[in-house]
Amino acid sequence: MDVVFESVSRPMTAPKEQPPAVANPEWEALRPQVLAQAEALRGDPEALAQLGLRVIAHNVVEFLPAALARLEAAHAREQSARQAVEDMAAANFAAQSETHGLSLDLLESRNNADLARRVDEAARGKFGLLGAMLGVEPGEDATVTPIGWKALPAGAVDRMLGPHEGWRLGPCPEAGELFGEAALSVKSAALIRLSLWAPERAGLLAFASGEADGFTPCMGADLVAFLGRVVERVASRWPLL
């Protein structure tokens, strides 16, 4: 027997609409009384606590924005100080690297004239200074001044630095005596005492800057003093008679 399925179409029925929410009749009856007693409600902390409410009066100063502003300002200052420390550390590291690189370069000097040239070129190229000079006072038994070095009068180093000081950083009133024609451009300098050859002769290593804050008395002198010791050791390879 053949079975035939007959499709029967049924009309679609529209979904029933949800009945509107019925207002709470008890609340509707109570609401006018609560509103009438609003002032009493504000003065009842226990009732407010039960309702999870709190009162903010018009004359209350809101401290939260000010507190947040202070925290943000403190954070900004901390970030700025941290960045300044990081920048200073990076600059110090770069200066140390350049100083050590210069020391290796000075060890390659062929004579005292080449030593003076290398110091001056490094001051200009590596450190962005106006230049550098090497000077020496006359000795008791020798007055020869190497080529490229400046001949200083006897007692000049003690006069510039003081009899017991190893260096001086800051303004350079002796710029004309040390740097000649470039003196007008010198705004600050680093002067390092040298002890050269045998018998001992007083000398000077000087770096010139075109900026007033290029060298200041509050700066550390460790690196320039280190270069002074390197110059002494290298110069001792070629004693002067």
Image (tube, rainbow, N blue to C red):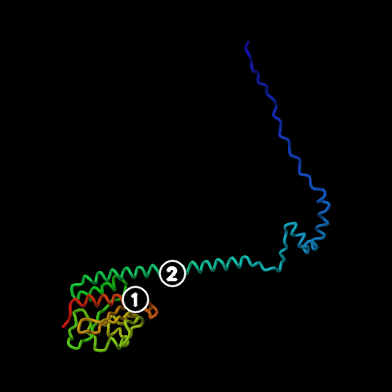
Bin the neighbour count of mark 2 within 10 Å (Cα to Cα): few under 14, some 14-19, many 20 and up: few
Q: Position of residue 191 (x, y in %)?
A: 31, 81
Residue at (19%, 80%) from the top-left corner?
146
CB within 8 Å, label 1 to label 2: no
Q: Residue at x 52, y 66 (%)?
A: 75
Q: Position of residue 200 (x, y in %)?
A: 22, 84
| Label 1 vs label 2, nearer the camera | 1
User: What's the mark number on residue 85?
Assistant: 2
Name the image quarter holding the N terminus.
top right
Q: Is residue 29 left or right of 131 when viewed as pictured?
A: right
Residue under label 1: 222
- Callout 1 environment at 10 Å: few (<14), some (14 to 19), or many (20+)? few
Q: In the image, residue 150 lies at what x, y percent?
A: 23, 82
Under circle 2, the secondary element is helix
- Compared with residue 193, is residue 30 higher up or lower down, i.e. above or below? above
Q: Secondary structure at mark 1?
A: helix
What amino acid does circle 2 point to? Val
Q: Residue at x 80, y 58 (%)?
A: 35
The reply, left or right, for residue 46 in relation to residue 223 is right
Residue 119 vertical position relative to residue 14 in the rendered view, above or below:
below
> Residue 96 at what x, y percent from top left?
33, 70
- Amino acid under label 1? Asp
**Could you tell me how far apart the alpha carbons at marks 1 and 2 are, in whole angstroms?**
19 Å
Q: Residue furthest top?
A: 1
Q: Is residue 39 left or right of residue 88?
A: right
Q: Is residue 9 shown above or below 207?
A: above
